[in-house]
Amino acid sequence: SGSGLEASPTPDSQCKSSTDMAARQRLAVLHGHVVEPPAPRQCGRSSPSASPQPTAAAGLNSSYDFIVVGAGSAGCVVASRLSEDPNVSVLLIEAGGNNQTFAVRSPFLTCPQLQNSEKDWAFRTVPQERTDGRVSCWPRGKTLGGSSSINYMLYVRGDRRNYDQWAKELGCIGWSYDEVLPFFLKSENYVSSVGELGFHGKGGPLQVTHMQDGNFKTKEVSERFVESCVAAGLPVNHDYNGASQEGASLSQVTVKDATRCDTASAYLFQNGAVKRPNLTVLTDHTATRLVFQGSRATGVCLRQASQNSCTPEIVVRARGEIVVCAGTVGTPWLLMLSGVGPAAHIREHGIELVADLPVGENLQDHLFVPTMFPCKPGKEALFFHDKSPKDIIRLLGEYVLGRGMAAFPWVTSLAFLRSGLRKEEDGNDLQVHFVSLVAHDDELSTKNFGTEVRSDRPITDLSRAPTHGVTILPSLILPHSRGTVKLNSADPSVYPAIDPRYFEADVDMQQMVEAYKFVRKVATTGPLSEVLDAEKIDESIPHPPESEAYMREHIARNAITIYHPVGTARMGLAGDPKAVVGPTLKVHGLSGLRVADASIMPTTVSGNTNAPSIMIGERAADLLKSEYGLASA
């Protein structure tokens, strides 16, 4: 790349505004910063300030203006937006490979097979005491697009009260809903007539559609769910991303023309960013640690995916800043490997301490519980059967034509509501996911969710599940429980210990019980009750099915992650002992380093977390562009 951020004072620059001048002075200082020649690094050494000997890598420069670590939901956004200025060089690093494959791009056919594939980090939690001692599977995208390439494509921003609470109560200045809404709009190209004026963007990279506009086999039963939510006391709200979130609707999804719209497709490929000469996208390379000189982050150590832990690392320097976008697990993992984290924990692993910060704390996640309802005899035509040759042949034909069920994700309807167990200012704490089919693949369920087929619990055997029916999932989306991500080793090839501490706060269980009660009410009320039979009951639970004791036991046995971890590099003011980054996403006490992904959320949002992660990427890019005076496309 060219000189990039370098800016020398000129007569013309004397006439710039004070803001522009300050930005140019910052850039000149950065380019005047002298980096000493790196010293050799011995395999196994764990000092973040000891500079490894660079190893030549084809196509890589020795330094870039900006380095973005993690080409996921936020990282692709940050790299794409920064590289809009042709005068800066940007390196985007991804541990996985390309995502432009049929398996990733198909929204229905192959989505469940992406977990535990080469495109998934396939993390696992420690056993969870309050969920029957089970280990939870935590898929995280290991490919361009990150988790936006392997998720279920629901487009949900959250409740506006979540963001207002960040700004008013948690010190996140500039992150109220009115302040982040422009970044949601900037990212979006909303291609539906169903939506509220002023709450959706046009012309952005991210394609968002509304399933209300679709024509698919299970649309009628999906609409029956919405109507039954109304009968159960919830309003219809066809735009839960509009002025208010509460209510029921068919889903808004990041899909267009039967194709997934992940952030790599949207921000790198479809807009041509990947062809920019000033943007380098490096796949199949893992960032093993960050390099510091004093309190300044100056580089990233890389290792090719096929290399072992004793292979010499590649070191790439950052003239400007490093933006870590490795996700709620990957970001704290990398920071702690680099000496940024709780002092005692860092030293316990023999790593030199760079900054004592609460990295890896404040972990939050969403949970849901699958509940199955078979269809009534004679109503089978309304439903999809995943083992029916007729339905499978029809599905394949629909995919070729880009329509029908093959054109959309699995979750066809959603509902948002409050349990009454949190103050109203918190926002909706419950969600319901409606899947218009019943899955029958035990092996896939075990791999994806950590479930186990048990002879003493017949309900766990999906081969015995109803042939036709629906799966309704009561969901806890504002938990009180907080967990951790910790190092297991200073070796970057050893996965971290993930402990979400599900249901550690008993009020979380009570909230989930309220969600379960609502689901039962919906299934037995209104138009849905006309086509569904009674809920599939776990007869091994020694409590009456209608009792709260049964519901608690059923939840403990079956609650699974919705794949929405957040919070491990919490945003807050410098004086906040729980905060890792400030409102500008700079890591407290350090320079040249920011975090931009779901890990910065101080509290989780009311809903699926992909859209907020993309917004965070847009916000981060805007902060950087403003500070450095960078141009936009």
Image: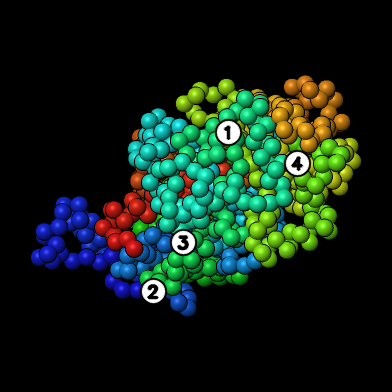
Seen at 40% across and 43% down, the residue is 198
Q: Secondary structure at mark 2?
A: loop
User: Between marks 4 and 1, how big is the CA–CA gap?
Assistant: 20 Å
Can residue 17 be seen here? The reply is yes
The residue depicted at 21 percent of the width and 59 percent of the height is: 24
Marks 2/3: CA distance? Answer: 15 Å
Lower sequence index among marks 2 and 3: 3
Describe the element under mark 3 as helix, strand or loop. helix
**Between 128 and 298, which is closer to the camera in this rendering?**
128
Q: Is residue 347 visible?
A: no
Badge 2 vs badge 3, beta-carbon distance below 8 Å: no
Looking at the image, is mark 4 or mark 1 earlier in the sequence? 1
**Residue beneath disc 1:** 236
Say the numbered circle drawn on residue 277. Answer: 2
Measured in 3D between alpha carbons, the distance from the residue under mark 3 to the one under mark 1, in whole angstroms, is 33 Å
Q: Secondary structure at mark 4?
A: strand
**Percent from the top left, x then y, of residue 226?**
64, 36
Point out residue 273 in the picture as x, y percentages from the top left corner: 43, 67
- Nearest the viewer among 273 and 126 is 273
Question: Closer to us: mark 3 or mark 1?
Answer: 1
Q: Label 4: which residue? A: 470
Crowd class of label 3 (few under 14; some 14 to 19; many from 20; radius 10 Å)? many
Q: Is residue 67 left or right of residue 6?
A: right
Q: Residues within 10 Å of mark 2 (few under 14, many from 20)?
A: few
For this rendering, which residue is in front, 8 or 545? 545
Q: Residue under circle 3?
A: 267
